[in-house]
Structure formats: structure tokens, C-alpha cells
Amino acid sequence: MNERMIFPVVAAALVDSAGRVLLQQRPAGKPLAGLWEFPGGKVERGESPEAALIRELAEELEISVASDALTPAGFATEMLPDRHLLLMLYVVREWQGEARPHAATALRWEQPADMASLPMPPADPPLVRQLAACLAWD
Ligand code: DCM
């Protein structure tokens, strides 16, 4: 039993009509700079994961997502020196607005099968595998 705090983080797999998924590149000066991640962020105290993700997508990408457009796709955990990250991924197929990078250096659309060659934060590759399985169901 460890005493590290659970640190909940939500992230989105925005899927376009060609089956490509949006990744954003973390900016210089932040932890994990330069790595490609599913957009998202920390769940604030008292916030639901879904509300947190809708807020983060508005802040980071300037897109608007309805709560019933969020489908859980998987989760991963990562033990950090000071906290235990719990990363929850949702599939999103419908949103309003065109994604623009506000918190990121760049955006790219990739097929999940092509993501293995990209440098990602440690918690994200297990989510890529869960996402691929989830999308294969549709
Ligand atoms: N994080 C992650 N993968 C993501 C999004 C976030 O591993 N797709 C991690 C990086 C940070 C924490 O979540 O440890 C908080 O993210 P941020 O620094 O963007 O607030």
C-alpha cells in the first residue's frame, strides 16, 4: 500500500471520418516537452471526468463537445515519484469547431496503427492499444 495521491487525468481520442486520431505535442518548458499526447488534462477537485474533459478540450483546442459524445475507451496508470497518475481515455467522434492548438506546439492526425513510432508520455502507449481494440469494434 503506498501513500501516493491518485492524480486523475482525462484525455480524448478525437476520431475523424478517416479513422485518424488527433495528437498534440507538449510545448517546451512543460514536463514531457516534445512528446505527442492525447489532448486532455487534470480533473479538478469536485469535477466529473466528463466535465473536466469537455473543459480541457475547449481550453486546449477551442472545440465544443457534448457529454453524450464521450465514450469511455480505456484507462492506464503510471507511478510517478510524487503521485499515481490515473489516465482515462474517451473516444469522441462528434464535436463543434475546428481544433486549433492552444496548449500545444503542434497537432497531427494519425491512425492508431502509426502511433507506435511517435514519442509519447509513458501512460499513453497502453491507451493506443486499447483505443485500437475499441475502434476495431465499430
Ligand atoms: N498526461 C499524460 N498523457 C496525456 C495527458 C496528460 O501522461 N495524454 C500527464 C502529463 C502530466 C499530467 O498528465 O503528468 C498533467 O498534464 P498537464 O501537464 O498537461 O496538465
Image: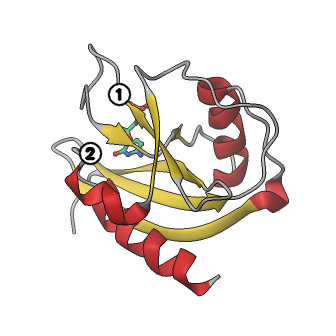
Asked whether the viewer can see residue 136, the reply is yes
Q: Which residue is mark 1?
A: 26
Q: Residue 67 vs residue 20: left or right?
A: right
Q: Is residue 105 above or below residue 23?
A: above
Distance from Cα at disc 1 to Cα at disc 2: 10 Å
Query: Image point 34% across, 19% down: which residue?
Result: 27
Query: Image point 47% across, 69% down: which residue?
Result: 131
Q: Is residue 83 above or below residue 57?
A: below
Q: Residue 119 vs residue 74: left or right?
A: left
**Dividing the image into 4 quarters, which one contains the N terminus?**
bottom left
View extreme (top): residue: 29
The quadrant where residue 24 appears? top left
Query: Image point 25% across, 25% down: which residue?
Result: 33
Q: Which residue is mark 2?
A: 121
Q: Are marks 1 and 2 in contact (CB under 8 Å)?
A: yes
Q: In the image, residue 65 lies at what x, y percent?
A: 78, 45
Q: In the image, residue 124 lies at what x, y percent?
A: 33, 55
The quadrant where residue 46 appears? top right
Type of amino acid at the residue the image marks with label 1: Arg
Question: What's the colour scheme?
Answer: secondary structure
